[in-house]
Amino acid sequence: MERGAPKHAIDQVIQKIQERGFKAHPSIGVERAVIGVIGEKTRDFIPYFQQLPWVENVIPVLKPYKLASREAHPETSQIKVGSALVGGNALAIAAGPCAVEDREQLLSTAKFVKECGAVMLRGGAYKPRTEAYAFQGLGRRGLEMLAEARQQTGLAVVTEVVDTRAVKEVAKYADMLQIGARSMQNFALLREAGASGHPVLLKRGLASTVDEWLSAAEYILAEGNPNVVLCERGIRTFETATRFTLDLSSVPLVRHNSHLPILVDPSHAAGNWRLVRALSLAAVAAGADGLLVETHPDPSRALVDGAQSLDFDNFKKLMTAVRKVAKAVGRTLQ
Ligand code: PEP
Ligand code: MN
């Protein structure tokens, strides 16, 4: 309540709280009165309470998400993705090209990253491109190549879905549906992916807060699909020296507030392959449950995101270094 709020105003607020079926917990000080509102769905009434006379501010204490919160599920969730497990003690590394370009490119990458210890293959068949006339991916043919790569290597396949109408099709081929940064608040897509029951990799929106990201996860969980993995991939800041700014503070924060496992994508954050190893190691040290790393047989010829893709040699070096840091923080690699 505002400073000096008269008793009748305080009593009126208490009465309005009770009339709506909530419990009021007033604490009346010499200068200020603070009134707690206890009950289900109190959030819906924030604007109502805010406009009552002498009310200074209404501050929600609870988070806007429930199913995603660690209170709802004290242990970190372990999500089975094909042959891989995300959220266990062993880190899950996903690697592969930004886009599926051709069979040879995909199969050679899949075999190589598997040999180095990756458990998931990434690769876009439907690409969300900023520019309308840029390469949009191979579509169905790309999905078929991903399925073939899984068959040959046993890797779990994660690939992006950008359209609600394609959720069923992508789920038929992939072990995990990726919802990209640009789609994080496409609520129809979140619901559809949730309803599919398929594991979902939810990337953080490029200008989204952690609470908005977890609220987006809540849409998927609310459809009865518990198989959600988060992925930090950098946010937009004033800094232009990197493609995005990798917000590593989100990793311990998400682990504190949520039970959902979290991967880190250093590739899209940096936009530059030279930074990928350092950011990956920092992510593992910060508590990430795994990484999503763009890897290409010849980044100079990549159709998409070559500048940030590791070649095979650098991917191998990355995995050697990741093993050491994982060990130092009490984790292993699958
Ligand atoms: C991707 O991982 O292929 C991708 C497009 O990333 P983001 O949605 O994070 O930009
Ligand atoms: Mn990419």
Image (tube, grey):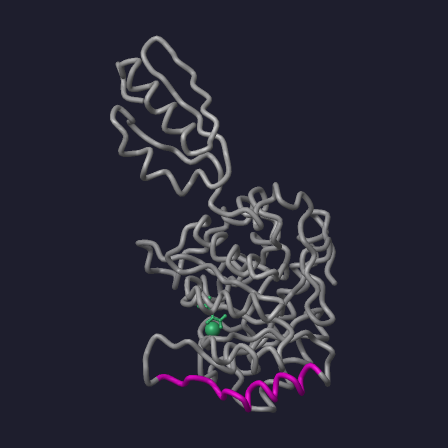
Q: Position of residue 164 (x, y in %)?
A: 47, 75
Query: Where the N terminus falls, by quadrant?
Result: top left
Magenta region, residue range: 134-150
Residue 320 x/y as whole percent: 68, 63
Residue 293 part of the magenta segment: no
Q: Is residue 27 left or right of residue 201?
A: left
Residue closer to the observer: 60 or 314: 60
Q: Quadrant of residue 48?
A: top left
Which residue is at the front of the view, 263 or 229?
229
Q: In the rendered view, tell whether residue 30 sits above or below residue 94.
A: above
Tell me the residue at 62%/68% (across/down): 197
Where 262 falls versus 118 (above or below)? above
Q: Nearer the viewer, residue 234 or 300?
A: 234
Instruction: Determine whether, in the image, residue 157 is placed left or right of residue 308.
Output: right
Q: Main secondary structure of the magenta part?
A: helix
| Residue 211 percent location from the top left of the image | 45, 48
Q: Quadrant of the C terminus?
A: bottom right
Question: Outermost residue toward the front?
Answer: 19
Quarter of the rendering containing residue 18? top left
Total labels drawn: 0
Looking at the image, which residue is at 43% across and 67% down? 183
Give residue 120's position: percent from left, percent from top.
66, 71
Q: Name the residue: 40% across, 67% down.
A: 182
Residue at the top extreme, as displayed: 30
Regarding residue 222, the answer to whether it shows in the image is yes
Toward which corner of the image does residue 129 lie, by quadrant? bottom left
The residue drawn where x is 30% and y is 54% is: 238
Pick the front one: 274 or 257: 257
* Magenta stretch: includes residue 149: yes
Q: Is residue 270 visible from the viewing direction of this image?
A: no
